[in-house]
Image (cartoon, rainbow, N blue to C red):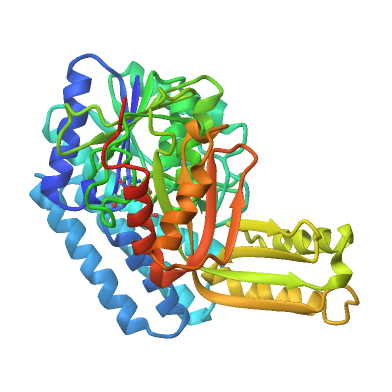
Amino acid sequence: MIVMKFGGTLMGSADAIQHSASLVTSSVKAGTQVVVVPSAMSGVTDSLLKIASSAENGEIAFAADEIASIKTRHITTARALGAASDSSAVAKLEGMFSSLEQTVNGIYLLRELSKRSRDLIVSFGERLSAPLMTVALESLGVTAHDLTGGQAGILTNNAFGNARPLPATYERIPQRLNGLFEQGITPVVTGFIGETDKGAITTLGRGGSDYTATIIGAALNADEVWTWKDVDGVMTSDPRIVSDAQNLEFLSYAEIMEMAYFGAKVLHPLAVTPLQKNNIPLRVKSAADPSFPGTLVTANATPLKNVVKAVTAVRNACIIDIGGAGMVGAADVTAQIFNILANLEVGAVMISQSSSMANISLVVQQNDGKRTLEALQRQFADSEQVRTIEFWEKISVVAIVGDGMRGARGVAAKLFSAVANEGISIDMISQGSSELNISFAIDDEFTVQAVKAIHAAFHLDKLEP
Ligand code: ADP
Ligand code: ASP
Ligand code: MG
């Protein structure tokens, strides 16, 4: 059994969906059971987020126009895939649009948008695209049935916007899907979404369809999980930034997690976690060139001669620096800082502490910056220990990742001289004890220049087996 996930671009038009469906049917017809996990059509998730916030702000005309244009796009696509205007697929889409309109209208009337209602609105992206995949599969002679993540058994906690699967998920999924397999039906499960025990729809965080696929893969003990992409596979850097980025044929779970965490948008950072227990391989494959091997992710990567395998960047971040001579040796200050982050549900991209403990620097995402700063200022307003809290915006975190860095000499020297040669100054440095990565913060305007220089310095345009 293989779980196959298709991202927004591969669901972006009737032609793209037809092609994605053909990648599924060739496996199904060769006798492999497949679970299909589609993302929303490209751009639709962003559009739904805009609809939600404009309704909250009273801009209902904008929201209505935007819904109308998404509606036209989906109905036209369904028709182009062969669904008749009186088909159950078109009726299903129309029903979903009335429900979206009602929800958006409720937000407009109340001028109130909670994380819970935002998740409900954004879930329409995948709930609308899944029936399109079903139509395409059926037109190619494969019997398919679409379900939401919740219907397929994905039960999550209440962390709307960034929900996590609960253990019962792994029992529910086989209970819900095995019956379909027995009838020769291919399940199509919406990416990105799950539901709470009360049936409220949750989302797994941006890019969460990758995570849906691996959760299902783990629950069904699949042979492999394949995420089909519009790139060759996982590459040495973002191909939109570095034109000579190379495909990485093998990566370990740990390496891809570090890459995703440090900004490689190609996979959700937690996507491989469900696969680790049973060592289920993940393949990142090129939809444009299905015979190309892509990237195989397993517990142990095949080592390359290149000790560094990838350069990544997290854009749009800021640094908060908390300092004061009185902080030396004061473990309670550290505890208070982390408590604040936890209470605000803010994850720090990078943390560094001077060995004297006279200051602690944090990098957080731009949209968490101000509220984290304000909470820290409140906490330490009358502190004897903390004297200064400084804040820098427009920061990026650049990281190098690779298993082979462990114990290798001269990696940091080469990295920092490559950056220094570009005349770029470094604001903060951190190295995880796993020695799988070195990350550092710079002014955002130098990100592309730094990434390109590092890619060249480590000869990532020529991978050596
Ligand atoms: P999907 O919609 O299939 O989930 P995404 O757009 O989320 O696809 O991820 C694929 C994109 O990630 C690629 O188009 C590419 O521009 C970007 N990307 C960033 N870093 C990398 C990398 N190291 N390797 C491959 N792609 C990357
Ligand atoms: N549609 C969602 C997003 O844009 C999930 C995904 O594409 O993986 O984030
Ligand atoms: Mg993605």
Lateral position of residue 362 relative to residue 18, left or right: right
Q: Nearer the viewer, residue 363 or 425?
A: 425
Establish if 80 lies above or below 145.
below
Image point 62% across, 58% down: which residue?
Answer: 348
Image point 29% across, 57% down: which residue?
Answer: 241
Q: Quadrant of residue 305?
A: top left
Establish if 153 lies above or below 238.
above
Establish if 371 lies above or below 4.
below
Q: Nearer the viewer, residue 366 or 242?
A: 242
Lateral position of residue 185 relative to residue 333, left or right: left
Q: How many marks?
A: 0
Q: Quadrant of the N terminus?
A: top left
Residue 268 place in picture, x, y as percent: 44, 45
Q: Quadrant of the C terminus?
A: top left
Residue 108 place in picture, x, y as percent: 45, 79
Establish if 278 lies above or below 435.
above
Image point 52% across, 34% down: which residue?
Answer: 254
